[in-house]
Image: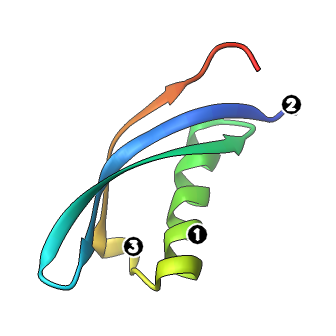
Amino acid sequence: MKEQKFEVKGDFRMGDEWRPFTKVIEAPSEAQAKERTYAVFGSKHRVKRSYITIHSITLLSGD
């Protein structure tokens, strides 16, 4: 399946604050983009899944 670009928006908890984020993730589907977002925050920022809230996932058109 072809990789598509998705824009993922939401909030994550850092310390006592919830901070907004917007990430562009390449994935074959919307569900996979959500999983990859969790994986990126977990590996780079050491944030647990329960501290990440995803509000929207939008497919970006074009390359």
Q: Amino acid at mark 3?
A: Arg
Please, what secondary structure does the residue beneath circle 1 have? Answer: helix
Q: CA distance from mark 3 to mark 2?
A: 26 Å
Please, what secondary structure does the residue beneath circle 2 have? Answer: loop
Q: CA distance from mark 2 to mark 1?
A: 20 Å
Q: CA distance from mark 3 to mark 1?
A: 9 Å
In the picture of the structure, the residue carrying the numbered disc 2 is 2
Instruction: Give the quarter of the image for residue 35.
Output: bottom right
Q: Residues within 10 Å of mark 2 (few under 14, many from 20)?
A: few
Instruction: Give the quarter of the image for residue 49.
Output: bottom left
Residue 26 horizontal side relative to residue 22, left or right: right
In the picture of the structure, the residue carrying the numbered disc 3 is 49
Residue 40 horizontal side relative to residue 53, left or right: right
Q: Residues within 10 Å of mark 1 (few under 14, many from 20)?
A: some
Of callouts 2 and 1, which one flags the residue occurring earlier in the amino acid sequence? 2
Residue that appears at 28% across and 73% down: 51
Q: Amino acid at mark 2?
A: Lys
Q: Is 20 located above or below residue 63 in the figure?
A: below
Q: Amino acid at mark 1?
A: Ala
| Numbered mark located on residue 39 in the image | 1
Residue 50 horizontal side relative to residue 5, left or right: left
Labelled pair 2, 1 in contact (Cβ < 8 Å)? no
Labelled pair 3, 2 in contact (Cβ < 8 Å)? no
Residue 40 position within the rendered picture, expressed as x and y whole percent measured from the top left: 58, 67
Q: Residues within 10 Å of mark 3 (few under 14, many from 20)?
A: some
46 or 30: nearer the eye?
46
23 or 38: nearer the eye?
23
| Numbered mark located on residue 26 in the image | none
Quadrant in which the C terminus appears: top right
Residue that appears at 58% across and 34% down: 6
